[in-house]
Image (tube, rainbow, N blue to C red):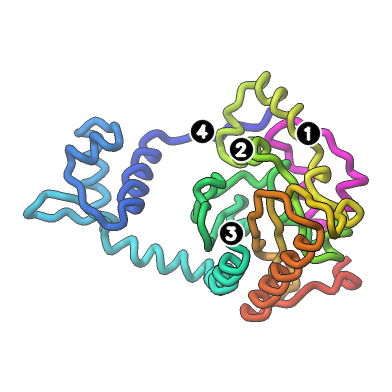
Amino acid sequence: MPKVARRSAPTVRVIQVLDFLVERRGKRYGLSELARELNLAKPTCLGILTELSAAGYLVRDPNTHTYGLGPALIEAGRVAQEGFAIAAMARAELAELSARYRGTCTVSAVTGGRITVLESAGPGLAKLGVKVGATYDFAPPVGLMYVLWDTDAAFDAWLATPPTVPLRQDETRLRQVVTECRERGYLVESMTAAGRRLYSLLAGVAAHDLPDDLRRLVGELVTSLGERVYLGVDLRPRKEHPVSLLAAPTYGGDGRQNMVLTMYVGRSITGAEIARRGAALVAAADAVTARSGGRAPNRSIDH
């Protein structure tokens, strides 16, 4: 059974306050209103507001006695933005893809051992169960696309990570998926709407809190990792195929995969249309790689 990470209730309440104010885009709130909106006791809420204000993360208006986001967050945001500067380079590519195919596109990466959504473009992101800044467990069955184009050692390390739910593996097919996706340059994933909701659950921290019996039941519903990915032989140019998403990698200066550009589809499209979208996604990812000073790996050397 996976080790359950202990959560700090006081810390969770601090995050609640900051998240609430960030989502309100700068609107200010009084103590009573914040306590009511966040379902916090007024003394508890006051203590959090006082400490955050003292540190500069919030400011208190002395006339209206309301609280808003403070200047310390500007510097924190600047530092974070510098760390994810390469993701910002993908913004224009995401916007172009989103406009061309009238869908949602994202860029994400593994940071600090977790998958993080860094940028997005297009409508419907909330309906997909993800948002910019969201983080997810980096463990099977979640995270294949983040090692698919990396080194064999990185792929093996991820595959050896204890899964969030019991999985049955067809390792032969999974290795075939790796080979084909590296040759093709992009991944095509098929999933039902129910499957997307299931994987959204498994991707979050809630997966670790599932009772053993429920985890086993969920595991029975989860197919082998490789079965969610179309191979070349699966795709017919004129036949329509239900597609959840397409994904393609970007690379750093060391030739290692560093991010994933994702195009959400969520409907059936022909094999020919999949090929067109895949080519456009790879071109966008290659442009981001070039703009950031990265390079595609030389597989004959790296592997």
Q: For mark 2, what is the residue? A: 197
Q: For mark 3, what is the residue? A: 103
- What amino acid type is highlighted by mark number 1? Leu
Question: Residue 184 is drawn in which quadrant?
Answer: bottom right
Q: Is residue 292 above or below residue 66?
A: below
Camera-near label (1 vs 3) is: 3
Q: Is residue 115 left or right of residue 157?
A: left
Helix, strand or loop for disc 4: loop
Disc 2 versus disc 3: distance between alpha carbons?
Answer: 18 Å
**Residue 83 on image: x %, y %:** 52, 67
Question: Residue 214 is drawn in which quadrant?
Answer: top right
Which numbered dot is residue 6?
4
Q: For mark 1, what is the residue? A: 167
Disc nearer the start of the sequence (2/3): 3
**Residue 55 in view:** no
Disc nearer the start of the sequence (1/3): 3
- What amino acid type is highlighted by mark number 4? Arg
Quadrant containing the N terminus is top right
Camera-near label (2 vs 1) is: 2
